[in-house]
Image: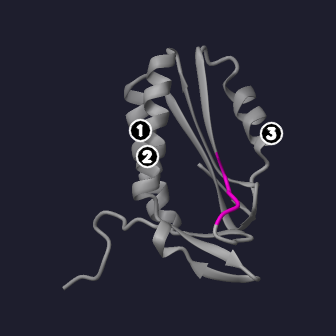
Amino acid sequence: MELFNGALDVPEILKRWYIEEAESNYGAFIPFIGTVRDEDGIDGLSFDIYEPILEKWFNSWVEKAKDRGAIVKLAHSKGDVLLHESSYISAVFSPKRRVALELIDEFVEDFKANAPIWKYDLIDGKRVYAESRSQKISGSGLLN
């Protein structure tokens, strides 16, 4: 898991990950790249991350992937990311393509539902919480 300030350097990260695993005998390398879309008049997005919970979440996926003979990688932005830049990259390396295809889908969907990352719209230089596009993390909320 890697966290970066600002937009991700997609070519550098993908190339580095490919080189790191080039001799690992994986037959499949399936990346997913998330890019900030031009919508609703925003100038970009900004992200806050609660790193201890994200690390725990990611480590659980490392174990799930390992059980299937695969590995997962993740890069995410902290702070501001402008339109058409990348804020998220994940990848699965696996001996077989079917495992990699299934795992990348499960990983990305679980990330969207459970990663402790708060998203803000950037509008006229201000951060505005993107409540309409946010999901409540399972188990979050106030204790009674």
* Residue extending farthest left: 144
The answer to the question of whether label 1 and label 3 lie on touching residues, with beta carbons closer than 8 A, is: no
Q: Which residue is drawn at 68% across and 17% down?
A: 23
Alpha-carbon neighbours of circle 3 within 10 Å: few (<14), some, or many (≥20)?
Answer: few
Residue type at numbered disc 2: Glu
Write down the residue under mark 2. 109
Q: For residue 10, which quarter of the picture?
A: top right
Asked if the magenta segment contains residue 37, the reply would be: yes
Q: For residue 4, which quarter of the picture?
A: bottom right
- Left or right of 116, for residue 93: right
Residue 52, given in percent of the width and then of the height, sits at 48, 64
Residue 137, given in percent of the width and then of the height, sits at 36, 65
Q: Residue 11: which numbered mark, if any? A: 3
- Left or right of 28, for residue 138: left
SS type, badge 1: helix
> How many angstroms separate mark 3 from mark 2 (CA)?
23 Å
Q: Which residue is drawn at 63% across and 73% down?
A: 121
- Left or right of 113, for residue 91: right
The answer to the question of whether label 2 and label 1 lie on touching residues, with beta carbons closer than 8 A, is: yes
Q: Nearer the viewer, residue 115 or 33?
A: 33
Residue 80, given in percent of the width and then of the height, sits at 72, 69
